[in-house]
Image (cartoon, grey):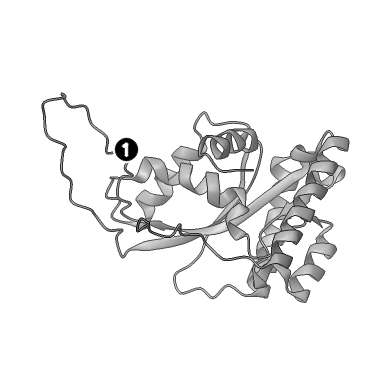
Amino acid sequence: MSKVTARWVPKLLSKEQKRERVRVSRELRSRYKVEEDLLDRIVTGDKTWFHYYEPESKTQSKQWKRRDEPLPIKVKAAKSAGKRMARVFWDREGIIHLDWLPEKTIINSDYYFDELKELRQAIKRERRGKLTRGVLLQRDNARLHVSSKTMAAIDDLGFECLPHPPCCSYLAPSDYWLFREMKKPLRGERIGHFKRLEYEIKKWEKGPLKNFIPLGWKSYQNDGIDV
């Protein structure tokens, strides 16, 4: 026998939750095969913290060395205490709406409903014709997102919600691709204040990245995750 460490996972799913995950995945795959514009209609989004200092990732801190040289040593840095939360809505063309939450803001159903109304106006302004084709809203099943008040608001705004398997928030593309890419240029930089942070994110938005969902899908496959 050998002593091994356990593989860490976000959550242990029950058999019923695993079956539901398979069912939702098959449903979405079948729908993708018959609806050619499915990806064009999807709008997804989530919230994340942006720290005024994000340590470099292991990949970013790589450096060249000769074979006879010892491995470099680097002190592990921690994220700064200063941070701001942002909620980002986006589609395969790029970011549609980014909202910086005021400090000490409590996100409830009323706040989320106001954000969805702002999102609808942003779609009308930035993506002409998307509302006519029908918006497919993709989000995880956090309690705030699936409350009866939120679902009624989504119906009133004319959005259709895509199904999402239970307890699988890490499957949302914002988590496994977009936020990682947005924070990459900030890693190793000491921002210091919110105005600089806002400027850096706006500069990233105007960058060359296009076709967000296909790029995110490619990145997801390259991470070696079984999909």
- The residue at 30%/50% (across/down) is 55
Amino acid at circle 1: Gln
Residue 82 position by quadrant: bottom left
Q: Vertically, is 222 above or below 95?
A: above
Depth check: give the residue in front, 92 or 10.
10
> In the picture provided, is 185 more to the left or to the right than 222?
left
Residue 78 position by quadrant: bottom left
Q: Residue furthest left?
A: 69
Kindly identify which residue carries mark 1: 60
Task: Assign the C terminus to one quadrant of the image.
Answer: top right
Residue 139 position by quadrant: bottom right
Residue 107 in picture, x, y percent from top left: 58, 72
> In the picture provided, is 117 more to the left or to the right than 174?
right
Residue 223 in picture, x, y percent from top left: 50, 39
Q: Vertically, is 2 above or below 189?
A: below
Mark 1, Cα crowd under 10 Å, few <14 / some 14-19 / many 20+, is few
- The residue at 54%/44% (across/down) is 177
Depth check: give the residue in front, 187 or 1.
1
Q: Vertically, is 133 above or below 14?
A: above
- The residue at 54%/52% (across/down) is 175
Depth check: give the residue in front, 174 or 203.
174
